[in-house]
Amino acid sequence: MPGRDKVYTVEISERASEMLIYHARFLANSSETAAKRLISQFESQANSLRNQPERFPWLSQPMLPEYKYRKLLFEKRYLLIYQLKGDTVYIDAMVDCRQDYGWLL
């Protein structure tokens, strides 16, 4: 399969980093272990996008351009929202699926 060995650069936006910090702080109020696991999983999933970032589905919302953003679900309820441009994966946001994130779009 072509491109299988290709390695992409992953860029995490400041906004996505701030969202991670917000969710980790919230979790730390009840469980420091859960907060650490969230951070670890975020890092692990972000790094996994270095290989085959196309494997995750498109994020389809009426307000978004078609085929611009992809989504990666992790820790049962968090989404990494990212786009692929050339050889770079740009992680633009991290959201909790239990909340309304329409404002983000």
Image: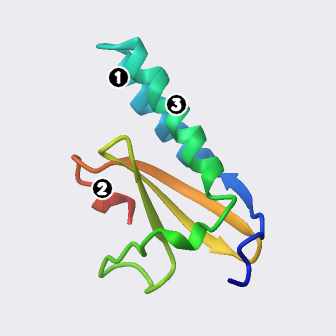
Where residue 17 sits in the image (x, y, percent)? 57, 40
For the residues bearing labels 3 and 1, Cβ distance under 8 angstroms: no
Q: Which numbered disc, 3 or 2, marks the residue that appears first in the sequence?
A: 3
Where residue 52 sits in the image (x, y, percent)? 63, 68
Q: Which numbered disc, 1 or 2, marks the residue that appears first in the sequence?
A: 1
For the residues bearing labels 3 and 2, Cβ distance under 8 angstroms: no
Q: Which numbered disc, 3 or 1, marks the residue that appears first in the sequence?
A: 1
Question: Circle 2: is it few (<14), some (14-19), or many (20+) Cα within 10 Å?
Answer: few
Rendered image: mark on residue 39: 3
Q: CA distance from mark 1 to mark 2?
A: 18 Å
Is label 3 in a helix, a strand or a loop?
Answer: helix
Question: Circle 3: is it few (<14), some (14-19), or many (20+) Cα within 10 Å?
Answer: some
State the residue position of label 2: 101
When asked about the image quadrant of residue 43, the answer is top right
Rendered image: mark on residue 66: none
Where residue 18 sits in the image (x, y, percent)? 53, 38
Task: Looking at this view, name the residue that lies furthest to the front.
Answer: 1
Say which amino acid is labelled 2. Answer: Tyr
At x 54%, y 63%, the residue is 82
State the residue position of label 1: 27
Say which amino acid is labelled 3. Answer: Ile
Q: CA distance from mark 3 to mark 1?
A: 11 Å
Where residue 100 sits in the image (x, y, percent)? 23, 53
